[in-house]
Structures are given as C-alpha cells and as structure tokens.
Amino acid sequence: MDTETVIDIQNLSHRYKTHQALSGVTFTVGRQSIHGFVGPNGAGKTTTLKILATLLKPQAGSRAGVHVFGQDIVLQRNSVRRRMGFMPDHFSMYRQMSVFEYLDFFGAAYGLGQVQRDKIIGDVLTLTDMAGRRDDLINGLSRGMQQRVSLARVLVHDPDLLLLDEPASGLDPRARIELMEILEELRRLGKTIFISSHILSELATLCDHVTILDRGTVKYTGTMRGLIANSDAATATYQLTLAAEHQPTSDALAQLPGMQRITPPLPNEPRYTLTFDRAQLPLNTILQTTLAAGGQVVSFAEDVKHLNQAFMDLTEPGVGP
Amino acid sequence: MTSPLFALFTRSVREDTRAKSTYWARAGLAAFMVVNMGIAVLARFVGGAPGLVFLQNAAWLQAVFLTISALGYFASAITEEKEEETLGLLRMTNLSPLAVLLGKSTSRLCGALLLVVAQLPFTLLAVTLGGVSSGQVFAAYATLAAYAFFLCNLAVLASVIAPRTGFAALGTGAVLLASWMGGKFWPPLAAMSPFRRLDEIFSTGFLGSPVGWQVGSNLVVGLLCFLAAWGCFEHLCAGRTESRPVGGTFLQRRFRGWFAPGRPDALAAVAWKDFHFIHGGRLAQIAKTAISAVVVLGLIAVEMWHGRNAWQTVPSKVFYLSLLWLVAEAGFAASRIYACELHDRTLSSLALLPQSLPVTLSEKVAPCWRALLPGRTLFCICVLCAILHAFGGKAELLMLIVGGGIGGAYVGTMSFLGVYLTGYLSLRMKHGALPLAVIICLGVGLLLMVPLLGWFGVPIIAVVVGLRLRSKILLRLEDLAAES
C-alpha cells in the first residue's frame, strides 16, 4: 500500500436487514488532503463513516478490505482508533461537564498524562477559539460553541485523521465559515480530513478531493478540479468577459490555433465562452490577442461547473429502494 | 378528528399500540392467569376455597402491576415530552394545559385499566370455582380502578414537577412509601391503601359495599393531584424547550465550586466520569453518610426512649435497612449507568476509545461500588456488631455464620442477577427498567418455595442468567453505539 494513502477502502459492501446500504465501494484518501464525501440522503455516507470509525464492523465479502494508515480496521482496531478522531453528525456530549473537564476526560481516556493533557487542551482551545470559555458548562454554550467543543474533543488526542460527519449542520453562516477556516488550519498542521457534508459550495472551496456516493455505489472519486472542470481530456473551455461586446476581438480569437468553438455573448452580458483543443492550448495568446484587438478585459477564467451541477449530473433523482 | 384533545389521545394510544412492551405486559398477565388457575385447582385438593385463592392472587398481582406502572409508565407522561424536547411544540398548537394533561394521562390510564378489566371475565370464574361471591369480585375491581386513578394522577403531578422521568418515578415512589408508612400513625391514611382494602374484601364473610372509603379517598386524592398538576403546569412547563443533562445532582451543580471533581486518571477516566457525573461524586457520598448517621442515631434514640438496650436491637434493624438500601441503590445505579449515555447520545464516543468494550464496561461498574461505600460501611459495621454480640455463645455464632452465609448467598446472587437485568432492560426500554427487574427477580425468588430445586437452583439460575445478561449488554452496547 502507498504510504501516502491514509484511507483505503476496497470493494466494501454493507447490508442492513432489508436494505443494501453499500455495494462494492472503493476509493482512497491521500495524506494531508481534505477529502469531501458527498451524496444524497440515504446514499450510505454515514454507514461508510461508521465503518471507518470502527463503530460498525465491515461485513465479510470477497476481496473486501478497509485499511486506515495501512492497518486493518478490524484486526488493529485500537491502534487505528488512536490515530483517528470521529465527530458524529449529532451532539454527543456530557453537557453537565465544563469545557475543560470534558476535554480532560477524553484526553485521559486516550491515555494522556496530565502535563501532556494540559498542553494539548490549551492548544486545541486556542485553535477552536474557546480558550475564554474553558470553565463554562457545556450545557450553557450555544450550538456553534458546542460544535467547536466537539471538534476540540476530536483533536484532543492529536489524531492524524479526522472523520467529520456533517460538521457544519445547524450552524449559522459565520460559525460555518469559521469552522471551515479551522479545518484549513488543521490541514496546514498536517492532518488528513475526511468530511461528509451537504453544503456543496463550502466543500467546493475547501476540499481538494471528493467522492460522490449514490445509492451505495461510488459515482465519482478523484480531484475536485477534475469533477467541476467543464471540459474533458481533449478540450479546455474558458470564460472571457469584456467591458463591452467587441466584434474585432471575437474575429481575432476565432483565428487562434486550436480554437474549436466561440460562443457569442448575450445581449447585456459581453461574456465569450471559448473552447480549445487542449493539445494546442494557447493560454497566454488568448489574452494577448484580445488586448491587441482592442478588447477591454474584465475577467478571464477557466469555465467550471458548480459542484451542485456536478452533483446533480452524477446522482439520480428520488430516494433509493 | 377535529378536537386537538382527541388528536393527542389518539397519538398516545397509537404509540402504545405499536410498542412491543404493551404486548409483553399482556402476555405476562395472561401467563400469570394460567398459572393462577393451576394454583386454584391445586388449592381445591388441599381443602382451600379455590375461587378465593384465584381472585386473591389476581387482584394482588394487578395491584402490584399498577404500582409498577405508576413508577414507569404513568410517571413518564409529561417528562417524556420534556426529554424529547417536544413539549414546546405541543404548547405551540391549540392544546391548552388541560388538553395536554388529559391527552397524555387518559390514554395511559385507559391502557392500564383495559389490562385490568380484560381479566374481569376470567376472575368471574372464581365465583364458579367457589369460595367467593360476585360482590367480592366487583369490590376488588372497584378498589383496583380507584387505585389506578389515584396512581395515574399522582404520577402525572410528579411528571409535571420533575425535569426527568427518573425523578418523577422517584417522587411517586417516595409519596407512596410515605403514605404506606404514614398509615401506621394516622388510620385514615392506612384506610386509603388498596392492599389493606383487598385484605378486608377477601376476609371470610365480607358483606360490605363494593365502594368503600378507599375508593372514595383514592378518587378524591387523585382528582386533587390532577388539579394540582393542571394548576402548576403552566408555571413549571412553560418555556421548557430542551431537556436537562442527565447525571449529577442538583446540589452538585449548585455547589460545583465546593466539590470540584478534580482531574481524571488516565487508567480510570470512565470511572472518574461516572462517579462524579452520574453517581453524584463526593457530595453524594457525604450526603449518604450523613443520612445513615441520622438514621442510626434516630433508631438509637427511639430504642433508648422505649427503655430498650440499643446495643442489642439497633444493629439488626440497621442490618436489614442497610441491606435494603444497598440493593436499592445498586439497582438504581444499574438503571442509570447506560441510560445516561443513551440519553446524552455519548455511547459512540465511549465505544471509540482505544480499549475494548468489556474494559469500558468494567470501568463503568467500578464507580457503582465506590458510590455504595456509605451503605457498605454501615452494613459491615452491623455484621461486625452482630458477630461481637453473638460471641456470647458458640451455638449463636454458628447459627449466625450459617444463616448469614445462606442468606448472603441468596441476596448476593439475586442482587447480581438484578443489577445485570436492570442494566440490560435499561438498554431495551425507555422507562420502568428498575421496577420490572425487581418484579422479575421477585418472581425468580418465588422459586425458593419449590423444595430442593428452588433452594439450590435459584442461586445457580441467578448467576448463569446474570453472566449471560452481561454478554448481552456488551452486544447491545455495540449495536447502540453504531446506531447512534
């Protein structure tokens, strides 16, 4: 197994009494990445997360295997648990404890000594911006703050892998943005983050990799860029917006080598969609040609799909059987 | 269905119809009726009145069944809405406090009464079997119906006042116990007891009215309880939108600074958490020690007041009291240690600790023993006193050791079964695990009446079933952790 692979799921299937939750799920998660895990309700995301978190045992099947840091999650369960932190999609807290007592308890339960606990708890409280609420009872904290404490709890034994199930659900926009900033910071600190969420816009900016699951099967797994790029291996599409519609620019661009199609702008929106043969891509030439022809460039960017669109394209409508 | 009152009533009836426990209760009562018929037939051969035996057994069982219902089923009427955080939603509808109370309590009362009344045709058989009149049958059922009304409304009042079902059940049980104890000092209170009334009804030559003082007083007190619940509903339940955390005592939260739990040890973090946040911590230890000291000193004072030798009489009384206390406290602890984790949805966090679930389970059981320290100390002092007292004669000492050993083996094994049964039931039922476990253990204890098989079989059955339940608890905890 590749040392850069943190999670390796091969041919995973899981069946509840009358419902096939997962069928041959296969994907990997690389080290120090933020890997989004997306799918409609009932797609099997939480089942996958629970199996990864060692709460559910993978059902026996041919060639099936789940490894975290190269370790089998069934055979080396305790070792996997030490290197992983799981944050469920609900508040799972001892609300009669203070923030410090709660983190201290989990630190001790993971076998950390008092001195080590003091240092780590201080660090995670600073990271989650909860240092000022250290002695407050959890019961009195707002939902956003409880979510921060939950995240602090996941970090208290300094795991290398974080499994987060809907960490932003129920949070207000500010709290969501702050949570995403914390996750970015955690990636910079070397953590691998596997995050399940329904808030696609935030996943699109946060994640570098994504897996889309629908009705228990993987519909896409790979880079986020590969998912949202509105082009294929052979072609590349760009959006060029000018200050005003400019026919000479349009004519000059049409003469460029590799140009396959140029979509004319709408009446009130001088934006051109340019499709090129990827092999002959004249990236710098596009802007040079536009400026030489007298066009006033407002913006120039690769044409990408919104993650919502990619999600809708890959998943089927309605709920599974 | 136009009336909101009926909507709530229908919902409650529908929920009860879907609950497996409803059918288990019916099956249990039906099984008892079959056994009871067998006992009545046997009574015919030993010269007793089979009809009277049959009716007596049925009525007593139903009275016990209703008492248990009050502690679990009736007491959760309003608290279950508080715990599920749905009381606010109910209050936002057109439902008035009266409609909520009636809707929640009437369905439960009807359910319990239906179970009781369904047995009326069978118990009329008692008249055919002989030894009992139809007047006695109707008087017994009037007693039970009035008792059910009283219990239901008392429990509903407790449910309105208490923040959680556990406290509501505790409050209901405490009031019942106080009323039974108070009956010794105030006769009208004793006459309210259905058990005393049943004794009167089943006495030979009973010709009294089917509706006596007990029926009237139970109905009146029940109505007063309902009116009190209605009166304080708005004050106590308005604005309650979320459930309170489970574990820890009110005093512990109030005097948090004085009784800080300290730091957990890395080798026993779960035990630290349970001791301080479920069993009440040091404050509860101090309170229990103080209560036991007050009880012992009170008993000594009473004995000395009556001119008796307290050294001789008090240890035996305290012995039984502390034994009862230990068993009750162990059962109460067993009913809470898993239920608290379920309520707070923290089982998954515990299950993810880097240790096996049996180790976590052992860590959860250890603080129960620590919490029992005041009761255990008192018990040990009494045993020591009894041994010292018995040193006067070798025969007395031998009797004490043999009797204490056999009794201890029975109490120990039954407690072992009771603790694991309570723990297991608390993972299966939302409410009433402890009373049900007590009833099952008492039922198993009845096997003692079977010569030889019971004497040797009961401890063995208790230990084997207890161990089996322990492994069942582990499996259930794993399932629940994955489900949460």
Image (cartoon, coloured by chain):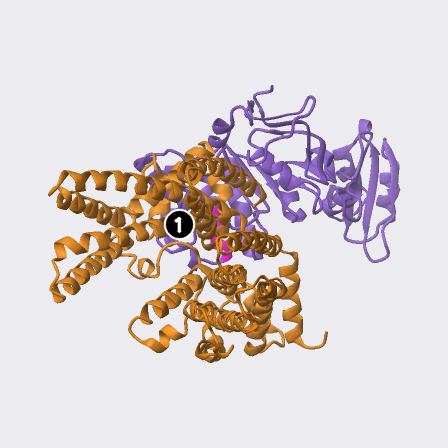
* Quarter of the image that includes the C terminus of chain A: top right
Measuring from the top left, give residue B244's x and y in whole percent: 45, 60
Q: Which residues are magenta?
A: A143-150
At x 39%, y 52%, the residue is B332
Q: Is residue A258 above or below residue A105?
A: above
Pointer 1: residues within 10 angstroms few (<14), some, or many (20+)?
many
Query: Mark 1: which amino acid?
Result: Gly
Which chain is purple in the picture?
Answer: A
- Side of A244 relative to B166 (left or right): right
Measuring from the top left, give residue B292's x and y in whole percent: 23, 56
Residue B100 lies in what quarter of the image?
bottom right
At x 44%, y 32%, the residue is B355
At x 26%, y 55%, the residue is B288
Measuring from the top left, give residue B137's x and y in whole percent: 55, 69
Label 1 sits on a secondary structure element that is helix
Task: Say which colour chain B has.
Answer: orange
How many marks overall?
1
